[in-house]
Image (cartoon, grey):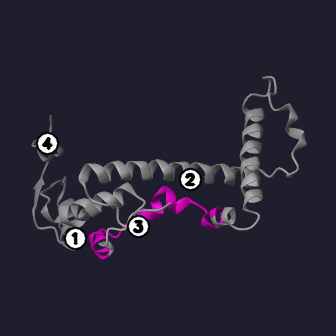
Amino acid sequence: MALRSSGTDAQFLRNMQCGCNYEKLSAVGHINLGLLQSFEKDGGEQCFLDFMVRNFQYATHHRRRMLPSVEDIFANEDKDTLPYSERDAKDAVMQRFWLEQAGRTQNVLNELSKQYGVPIPEGCHSILDYMDYVDYGHDQRKRNASWHVSCFSDADRKRVKKVLKDFRVKNYTMHAMIDDCIADFAL
């Protein structure tokens, strides 16, 4: 999966100030890179064929569990040369899912890049990563936010003040009731 380099990778990394690794949460973070690399080596066609056979095996095995009384449209499956392994088949299906999801995510990233006119930084495979890059990250939003917190007791009030202080939040208002807290935002 090739991404364009914008030359602003350092800025991209600086903008990721919230400490969350969206890359590991994205579809790309779930793809077995060793599997992809095995497709490119000598014998890669056989690896890919085995991968697809495992996907078919999973589909047929799962179909038999879910619809045992329906006529078996996969009657010729006995001719497979690979032994069936539930774990390998599930893994193959999950890898196919993550590959497809990564492709869909890349399409969304390309659309967002066109919409915002900001190139996708190299190594960015997550929509959340890209949006942080475009609007300078969560830290900027957190710093400029006006926090409204409801506290029911003095103990709540003390805990909230401690947490807000730990996060260096200064612009906040405490309310005794949740209704007061959301009154400005209610429709």
Q: Are marks 3 and 2 in contact (CB under 8 Å)?
A: no
Label 2 and label 1: CA atoms lie apart by 37 Å
Dot 3: element: loop
| Residue topped by disc 2 | 99
| Above-or-below relation of 127 to 21 | above
In this view, the residue farthest toward the top is 70
Instruction: Check disc 2: other Cα within 10 Å, few if <14, some if 14-19, many if 20+.
Output: some
Residues 129 and 169: in front is: 129
Label 4 and label 2: CA atoms lie apart by 40 Å
| Residue topped by disc 1 | 167
| Residue topped by disc 4 | 185
Instruction: Check disc 3: other Cα within 10 Å, few if <14, some if 14-19, many if 20+.
Output: few
| Residue 59 seen in this snapshot | yes
Q: Earlier in the sequence, mark 1 or mark 4?
A: 1
Give the amino acid type for the residue marked by disc 4 in the picture.
Phe
Q: Earlier in the sequence, mark 4 or mark 3?
A: 3
Dot 2: element: helix
Q: Earlier in the sequence, mark 2 or mark 1?
A: 2
Dot 1: element: loop
Frontmost of labels 1 and 3 is 3
Give the amino acid type for the residue marked by disc 1 in the picture.
Phe
> For residue 27, which numbered disc appears in the image?
none
Residue under the point 85% across and 38% down? 77
Label 1 and label 3: CA atoms lie apart by 19 Å
Label 1 and label 4: CA atoms lie apart by 23 Å
Give the amino acid type for the residue marked by disc 3 in the picture.
Asn
- Side of 141 relative to 128 (left or right): left
Q: Earlier in the sequence, mark 4 or mark 2?
A: 2
